[in-house]
Amino acid sequence: MQTVVSQTSPPKKSFLYDPKVRGIFYQVLLVVIVSYLFYVAATNAIENLQRAKIASGFGFLDNTAGFDISQALIQFSAAGSSYGDAFIVGLLNTLIVSAIGIFFTTILGFLIGIARLSKNWMVAKVAMVYVETLRNIPLLVQLLFWYIAVLGPLPQPRNSIEMGAGFFVNSRGLFMARPIYAADAWAIPAALVIGLIGTFLYRRWASARQAATGQQSPVGLVTLGLVVGLPILTWIVLAIVGANPISFELPRKGTFNLTGGMQILPEFVALLLGLVTYTAAFIAEVVRAGILAVSKGQTEAAGSLGLKPAQTLRLVVIPQAMRVIVPPLTSQYLNLTKNSSLAVAIGYPDLVQVFMGTVLNQTGQAIEVVVITMAVYLTISLVTSALMNIYNRRVAIVER
Amino acid sequence: MKKALVAIAFGLTASVFATGASAQATLNSVKQKGFLTCGSNTGLAGFGLPDAQGNWTGLDVDLCRAIAAAIFDDPTKVRYIPLAAKDRFTALQSGEVDVLSRNSTMTMSRDTQLGLDFPAINYFDGQGFMVRKKLGVSSAKELNGASICTQQGTTTELNLADYFRANNMKYEVVAFATSDETFKAYDAGRCDAFTTDASGLYAERLRASAPDDHIVLPEIISKEPLGPAVRHGDNQWGDIVRWTHNAMLNAEELGVTKANVDQMKTSDNPEIKRLLGTEGKFGEAVGLTNDWAVRIIKHVGNYGEVFEKNVGEGSKLKIKRGQNALWTKGGLQYGIPVR
């Protein structure tokens, strides 16, 4: 048996039929077509805007705004601020309601998720009813409900309810004392930072000690002392040595409303309540799924090692459940941020309300305003997503 | 195959992008569709509000009905698109509505920068304030420190800031997207005062849970010439809207009413003859028929009739003609001659 072995390379195929070349050709073609479409869309839009005599470009951001905003975290006035400033005010309002909302919804969501798995029948059913009610009613309806629920029973400013310690509540919102800082007040946050660093170091030392000797340290007490005790001690020392570093301006009754102090708008409270309770229902389900994904053997093993149920949950179940929880939890955080744009229905001045509402209407530059707004939401979401991915990588299972 | 698909997709997309607004197209497209799309208020008594049967009524709505009557000889050929203040100009710019008849104030920036034209002023108005009687406030100058509810994206929002700045007073603005949300918040006690155009104050007061608990303050802080808006660049369409309004004004001035329009056709008065199309070809010049004004008056009525029915003595609002009386009676409404 003899076989003829060809010494030459396989017969040369036509350039046209080379799969690699064809692949590159189609990809280049796609990029060209997509870029051309964007180019056509952009030039067409510009041409039509010019023909219809609609102003275009981003110069409007420097123009004087001419309107006021109820909640501004930076200095904002109708006369002195521009549309660009209004954009920043709206953006900050969106960010603050999202950040505070994410903080509280995480706590509430975890509590309810764990409660749904409780062995106590009552607790589990209450959690179930909460989840099924809240996640099955549209958020917009809930926001309107909260706004009316918050606003309805509250008294007019002249009959403000005094809650003590400088807190007042009426239909214009929640009023509280405003801290006024003296020159040496910086020492208090400095003490807090030192306390935090101290806690971190102490915890590292304590866990190393436990790993080496098995002896436990009073971590909780020391943390409390460093984080809370140290700043308070600094305050007391400052107050004894010199003037009180922080004084408070109390709200006083004015003609129409309380003046002075700090005010939290009812729109903000309603939006926060709506977002927190709604998103918590989804997070509860994510947490429940995550905990159920940890096999029963883990709990039983922890039990046989003598861990208490609370310790089992904290040290064995939750760390393993986090791998399952974090990716869908990220989606819920993103949802909360995006849902905050429903603020427009209850008059909270978020980015959409201020920028896509008032600014768009006063300038008429719909394309620019909408593009900026979309870019902002995209950026916020991508940043949140990136941070959560970093955290996910830390808690993810490490294959060995 | 793949290439063919790409070609089709590309062709489709290109054609979608290429449909720019051609300048003289509105009348033709309205005729082709068979109806007029009219951007109306989401609900403002006397100006644009659906009644219990779902029929739209009001001064602004009647202008749309008049335009439809002039084009189709049928005032019902209108599709109403209720628009919040902040959406209205975008809806008009993008071609979603043919005409915006929604108590919108004509200003220079809207006329020159938004790509709009305001062919007529069908209601001269000014901004005012409404407060609860029990506050004991009798003048807008006493509103220092008040919370004020307003609708966003309006001239109202800007005038408010101007007025408080000019009088060196502080206030807290609470802005909502729609007039409905704004008034509900005021009625629920969120604000001390509610501000909008004076006509709107009277209209909204009717909706309050207890209308008699509220008073309108005497100050009028701005000029609000309200009128229909069309896209800039389609002059023929702008002309149709302008002359529809002027036909209604001239009819009132000449005593032509819904009831007597047919007898008036035999009138010897040359002004009436030109208006009703028995002399000259004025209708054809704007792309309509020569009996365009007859159609408007027969189906909708003259300006005075429309005013009285919707906002005047014949309505719940009981607004006096005031600035909106004809120029011959000391008002500002001045019918431009058909000649």
Image (cartoon, rainbow, N blue to C red):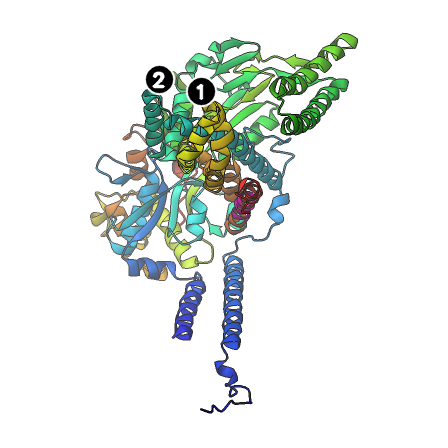
Query: Does the magenta-highlighted stretch encompass residue A375?
Result: yes
Res A202 → quadrant: top right
**SS state under label 1:** strand
Q: Residue at x 51, y 24 (%)?
A: A265
Q: Dot 1, crowdedness within 10 Å: few (<14), some or many (≥20)? A: many
Asked if the magenta segment contains residue A362, the reply would be no
Mark 1 residue type: Val
Does the image show residue A334? no
Res. B212 mark: 2
- Secondary element at tag 2: helix
Specify the label residue B131 is tagged with. 1
Quadrant in which the N terminus of chain A is drawn: bottom left
Magenta stretch in the rendered image: A372-381
Residue A280 pos. (x, y %):
43, 31
**Same chain check for tags 1 and 2:** yes
How far across and down, in percent of the image, does residue B231 sit? 44, 53
Q: Which of disc 2 and disc 1 is earlier in sequence?
A: 1
Q: Looking at the image, can residue B116 be seen?
A: yes
Query: How crowded is the residue under tag 2: few (<14 C-alpha within 10 Å), some, or many (20+)?
Result: few
> What's the magenta bit mostly, secondary-structure-wise?
helix
Relative placement, left or right, of A339 versus A70 is left
- At x 38% / y 38%, what residue is drawn? B326
B65 vs A219, left or right, is left
Vertical relation: A181 (above or below) A204: above
Amino acid tagged 2: Asp
The Cα atoms of the two marked residues, 1 and 2, are separated by 11 Å
Give the chain letter at badge 1.
Answer: B
Is A87 on the left or on the right of B53, as rendered? right
The image shows residue A290, relative to residue A230, as above or below, that is below
Q: Which is nearer the eye, B54 or B11? A: B11
